[in-house]
Image (cartoon, rainbow, N blue to C red):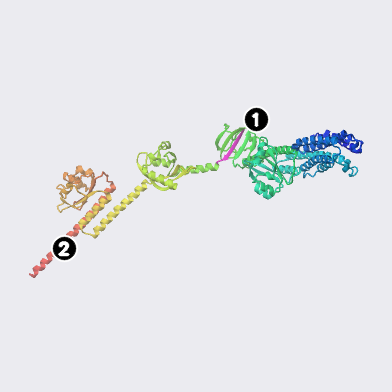
Amino acid sequence: LVAQESAALIVLAASLLVFRTFRERYLLIWILGWLAYFISRWTVHGSLESDSLPRYLTAISHAEFILAVCLFAAAVFVYTNARDFLLPLLLTSIGVIAYAAARALLWPDSVTLRVALEIAYRLIALTASLQLIRFRWARWEIGAWLLSLSLLLQHLKWAPITDHLPPGFSLMGSMMLGLSMLLVVFDDYKLRTRRLGVVNALTTTITRAQQHGPMMATALEELKRLMHASAAWIRLLEGDRTVIAQQIGLSQEYLRERNAVKLDDNLEQVLREGTTKVMKTSAATEDIQPCLKAERFHHVVLVPLLGKKSAIGILVLGSRHRLSYTPDEIEFLTTSAHQLGLAIENLRLVEQILRSQRQWANTFDSIHDFVLVHDAEFRVVKANRAILQRLERAPADVVGNLCEAVLPRNYGQWSGCPYCHGSDEGFYEGTDPCFGGFSMISTSSYMEQGSKQKGTIHVVRDTTDRRIAEEKYRLLFEQVQEGVFVATPEGKLLDCNDAFLRMLGYTSREELMALNVDAELYASREQREVFRREVELHNYVRNFEVTLRRKDGALLSAMESSFATRNAEGKIERYQGFLLDITEKKRAEEEIRRRNRELNALNAMAVIATQSFDLDEILNLTLRQVISLLGAETGSIYLSDSDEKTFRRRAGWGQRSAERARFSEVKFPDGFGDLVTRSRTEVITAEYLPHLPPLVAEFIRADGLLSWIWVLLWGKDGPMGIMGISSRETREYTSNDENLLVAIGRQLSTTIEKVRLYEETCRAYEDLRHTQEQLLQSEKM
């Protein structure tokens, strides 16, 4: 064997040894190629001139060489995952091999055909070299470049060319080809080793990670360095948007513009199909393409992050160089992303659980009420910060111990648990057996999952201050003298105090609360409607006067101050307010007003009596005042003549009856009867009718009205007159009315005597003047 054949044989043997470890399909094709290369060289073994050999051996040698070149190219196409080139290569290989054999057999001396053969197999080698360089571009691996160059250096022995090559050139080309093939295999093995290292690093990081943020940063750094990426980032799904959770190598402008984006078609496809996708910048959607160009990315690799049930996000690797990816690399990215997705999902769940536990613990400790949890044996399982501070103990001194050992017994004797009152669940309010005062205890039971052991939770709220305040306001509610009530707009009484009961004459709350307030307590429907309008408009009323109906049917006046309570929709739910009984106050005010009117009337009459001596004027003014004060409709004043038996009407008001007109002058021969005369009766009412002389009785009832009252005007010796008023409506004159009439009658009697005395004086003076005049005339005569 010559050196070139030995070199081919050595490379073949080395390839077989390597194939035992790395059973790659492209390596097997390379071995077949080296076998064909060895046969092509061995066929022309020992020959210096190709034309000294039989033509068929030359044809076999050329055909084997072309086959070797085609097999080398096929191995490159398999290695670069360019499966689309295999079928064209097969057809081309068959044609070129047949052409090489036919040329050697039929036209061995044709230079043109030889040149065509040289060009044909070199084109195959050039195509494989370009595909290999294109596939391993920017990888910085010498094996691929050396293999591409070595493929171009392989050639058939042709004297016009090979004779001018340096000695050993063919041997060096063969050795370089074999070594470069082995370098490619070793580089591939090295890359696998690095991927395995990244997997181990990811596994270690995931195992040790406590939070998903640092773990994602470490994983991105490893994957970015392994895949020769310029940037790497992870987008996590949040609803219909994806948000960058961690990144390495992105600019701040990209983060501002693309931090949270909606799912586009490419992202939806990757998440839906669960497959890795290499997306060139030129093929990106219009909204993301400017951002990718601004980052100078040639392409991005989109790898779905798969959780246990569905995709949780996307791993993105951006590269500024043109790179090709083998199926192993794609599978590695997919597997790594799946492992990373599971880790992120698990860590997020762990963080959520820890966060929930912290929140629960913080919530548990932030409760100001005492929270005590114990098991069925009354052993403390959990106690919050409030009860620990009250006990002045650390959690370790309380948890795990019996309730009897940690809770005080200062305010009562108990066993087991002081807050268990014979019922598993419910509310209890009373004296606190541990800390004194009053407390409200909420008790509920629980059972741990997977266990039949039952526990109890007590929530103890100190209600001492509330009970004191409630007692204070309860006493205020009960003892206040104003009526306090709560009622609905429909008229249902919800609550009231004792003063409200007493005001309305009821003895039982149940009896009063069964009534309808609007229909049975409020006497005036119009007042109630005005009240509703005022409350609807202003939400309250103040000093609103109402008329209420007592249990016995009597009416009372009250002053109401109420306000409305509304629900969330603004609708009135209830009225709350106070009622102050002002019946006596109104009666007193009315009495004062009446007395004022009486005093004003008496004063007016006194003024007239002092300013005027016209008896008719005085009598008419007095009669009008009396009628106005007592609300009468008619009235008359009669004065007696000198014989004290005859009475003439000197003043009248509102009288139209013929009977009264007939009594414009009346004579009472028998006077007013013995009873009236002896007792000097001043007021004559219906009680005196049976005791009066018939003429007097007829005189009094002459108006024919329902209500009447007469007053005798007494002088020194007997009645000097009589004054009477009457009304068409039935009316009972009170003792105050009678006293007023008596006072007016006495004042009027005094005034009449004064006027009569004045008139008598005037007449005496006039008689004296006439007498003097007559005496003067007598003397003159």
Between 247 and 745, the one lying in front of the other is 247
Task: Using the image, tell me which numbered label, if any, was put on residue 765.
Answer: 2
Q: Which residue is mark 1?
A: 451
Q: Is residue 644 left or right of residue 194?
A: left
Q: Residue at x 90, y 44 (%)?
A: 166
Between the C-alphas of marks 1 and 2, the distance is 131 Å
Q: Reply above or below: 768 against 35.
A: below
Q: Identify the image quadrant of residue 40.
A: top right
Residue 590 horizontal/vertical position (percent): 33, 49
Q: 391 or 284: which is nearer to us? A: 284
Element on which disc 2 rests: helix
Above or below, comparing residue 208 to residue 612 in the picture:
above
- Residue 81 placed where, x, y %? 76, 38
Q: Is residue 457 within the magenta segment?
A: yes
Front residue (pair 348, 454): 348
Residue 246 quadrant: top right
Name which residue type carries label 2. Answer: Tyr
Q: Residues within 10 Å of mark 1 (few under 14, many from 20)?
A: few
Main SS type for the magenta part? strand
Q: Quadrant of the N terminus?
A: top right
Residue 352's image quarter? top right
Left or right: 635, with 313 as reference point: left
Q: Residue 24 in the image: x percent, y percent?
A: 80, 35
Earlier residue among tags 1 and 2:
1
Is residue 772 among what the camera can see?
A: yes
Q: Amino acid at mark 1?
A: Ser
Q: Residue furthest bottom?
A: 780
Q: Nearer the viewer, mark 1 or mark 2?
A: 1
